[in-house]
Amino acid sequence: MTRNPSQPSRRAILGGGAFAALAVTAATTAPAHAAPSAAAPATLAAPAGAWPTEFPLPDGFLPEGITIGRRPYAYMGSRANGAVHRTDLRTGEGATLYEGATGTAAIGLKADRDGLLYIAGGGGGTARIVDTRTGRLVATHQLTDPTGHFINDVVLLGDRAWFTDSRDSVLHGVPRGRDGEIRSLPLTGDWVQTPEVNNANGIVATPDGRGLIVVSSQPGRLYRVDLRTGYATGIALHGAGDVAGGDGLVRIGRTLYVVQNRQNLISVFDLDAGARSATLRRTITDPRFDVPTTAARWGDRLYLVNARFTSPQTPETTFNGVAVSL
């Protein structure tokens, strides 16, 4: 782990060095050492018709990941420079929380209950931690070599934040809220690693909180991963041949939402009790989808960011987030 020596200690940051403008920001997910509750991040439903279902992001932002805390604030990461944008879901208004830095990226991200934001660093091979109260960088973990890897998404489970690497068959477990050793968990069993394409992408906990569900974008498979051994078991799909382009995952109880980016749809599956099979129940599409990558839940809505991979990726390209009903 490499810490930013110019930043104050985590104790000082969380103890009272918060900016007043960000003091209302809260974190998400169940307490460490407990199986996550699917309902925890969304304790209040968005009033029907009252909150906006679309909001702008800065031009050229190149969004990828989105996460929502216990309060109605969405945090979105930038592939352009690793910045994090925060939007108030009640108004659709937003501002930059973390400026990022040239040569970095913010791909998947998750907000913890203690105010820390865990960020997958893409091709840089890093996991970064930003304090949502202050917008300060707390720590940077170098998970892999900076070439030949792509740290893509993250889930919080127990005492670790688990990161996927789309270019390697390994998961990386970063300790949550404490110092400690990073755990590398090689994927074995049914796992198939295809060279030169994105494999492991979105990641969520299993319904029982004892394992992980990982989507491999190409050719589009779901796996259940044993956290003790790394053994990956293919999840049998019923009603769908694959989940091609599978990107972000959201699980609510035994319902699994799979965002299929270039397909411009969300596939909704029912998981069996052991998360060993998944039955397609319906799909969600929307004319506002423009290659959505990841999603996060608040109340009876899913919020997504449009990465617009098929459009010019320039400083002038416009980007937005949208909400759809569950």
Image (cartoon, rainbow, N blue to C red):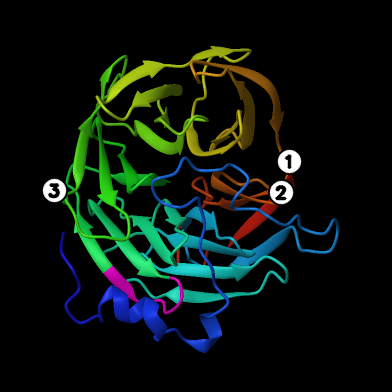
* Residue tagged 3: 145
Q: Nearer the viewer, residue 124 or 186?
A: 186
Magenta region includes residue 265:
no
Q: Which residue is mark 1?
A: 326
Measure the alpha-carbon separation of dots 3 and 2. 38 Å
Q: For label 3, count other residues whose C-alpha is less than 10 Å away and answer few (under 14), some (14-19) or many (20+).
A: few
- Label 1: few (<14), some or many (≥20) within 10 Å? few
Is 100 drawn above or below residue 121 in the view shown?
below
Give the x, y percent position of residue 76: 50, 61
Q: Residue at x 19, y 49 (%)?
A: 143
Rendering coords of residue 210 (x, y %): 41, 30
**Start-end of magenta stretch:** 132-138
Provide residue 264's location: percent of width, then percent of height: 61, 37
Residue 296 or residue 252, whichever sits in front: 252
On screen, residue 22 versus residue 51, left or right, reads: left
Q: Residue at x 30, y 19 (%)?
A: 192
Disc 3 marks a residue whose amino acid type is Asp
Q: Looking at the rendered structure, which numbered label has been put on residue 298?
A: none
Residue that label 2 marks = 301
Drawn side of residue 105 relative to residue 221, left or right: left
Report the Cα–Cα distance between label 2 and label 1: 5 Å
Q: Quadrant of the C terminus?
A: top right
Is residue 318 in view from this perspective? Answer: no
From what the image shows, is residue 122 above or below residue 275?
Answer: below
Does 99 sit left or right of 317 as displayed? left
Are dots 2 and 1 in contact, CB under 8 Å? yes
Q: Which circle's residue, 3 or 1, is located before the other in the chain?
A: 3
| Residue in the image at 36% along x and 57% along y | 119
Q: Position of residue 255 (x, y in %)?
A: 63, 30
Above or below residue 229? Residue 261 is below
